[in-house]
Amino acid sequence: MVKKAAQVVIATIIFWLAWWGVAEISNSALFPTPWQTLDSLWGILTSTNAWGHIGISTYRVLAGVAIGSAFGAIVGLSTRYWTFMAVAVQSVIYPLLQSVPTICWALIFVLWFGLADITPILAVATSVAPFFIINIWEGLKELDSNLTEMASVYTDSRWRVLGKVIMPMLYPYIFAATRSSLMVAWKVVILGEIFGAASGMGYMLSIAYGSYRIEQVFGWTLAFAIILIIFDYGIFSFIDRKYIRKWKPQET
């Protein structure tokens, strides 16, 4: 653990030194130094207005993931009970959602709803739904059929079998889908806010870019990176170690 922490520190120092060196060599206003970026980041973190935009983006991410995950989970689970849905997911629904670029959805929603909260939220929802569809679909294929058959002997209720047997076995797949979705959602919401919102982190990035405040662009980008690191290496890594690994099969 100590060795790994030391390697992380060394890698971080090398990254910052390389950044500083390139900035000094280029000597360009379009490439701020790490210190200028950190100063801009500090200005963002100490601004009440900036925290308001961060909160708005967080709300849109969570709302979009909630909508996309609900739709994806329903569609994915339906493939177990209806053959038609399995065919529809494989041939139409999943390929459509997976193949259309996020920017296309963002532009479509801008045309439909204008600069409103619903635009980036729906852009996030359409981007994360495929993660839940494919993870739950694949998870259903890996279910232990002996357990589900045994459960069916003791109850005729599909809902009880689903809640007590099937869903617990799907927890690792749902967690993986949620983790991937939130990472993608943060990237999508920035794009959606740049094209179709009048608030949020993406909107502030667009304002900074439009006014040629490059250090602000770097500052908001660094703030965005920190949020992703907190979600991935903080929240999700902790949940994985504490709760999810016990559902994974033990290697023999």
Image (cartoon, rainbow, N blue to C red):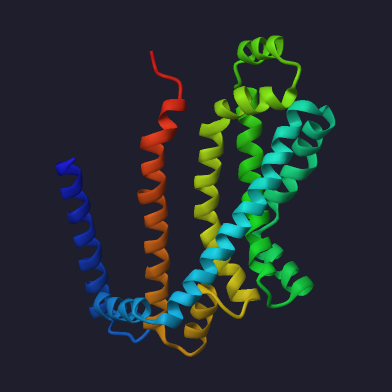
Instruction: Give the tally of numbered discs.
Output: 0
Query: Depth check: 148 or 72 in front?
Result: 148
Q: Residue at x 71, y 50 (%)?
A: 97
Q: Is residue 139 above or below residue 186?
A: above
Q: Residue 165's x, y, as percent?
A: 61, 22
Q: Quadrant of residue 174?
A: top right
Examine the rendered structure and indicate whether residue 132 appears above or below residue 245.
below
Quick one: 235 or 92, which is closer to the camera?
235
Residue at 64 percent across and 38 percent down: it is: 134
Residue 103 occupies quadrant: bottom right
Residue 227 placement, left or right of 66: left
Quarter assignment of residue 218:
bottom left
| Residue 94 seen in render | yes
Looking at the image, which residue is at 60% across and 16% down? 144
Residue 147, image x, y percentages: 61, 13
Name the residue: 58% across, 68% down: 191
Q: Going by the image, does 111 lie left or right of 223?
A: right
From the viewer's perspective, is 9 left or right of 135?
left
Name the outermost residue toward the bottom: 211
Question: Compared with residue 244, is residue 251 higher up or lower down, i.e. above or below?
Answer: above
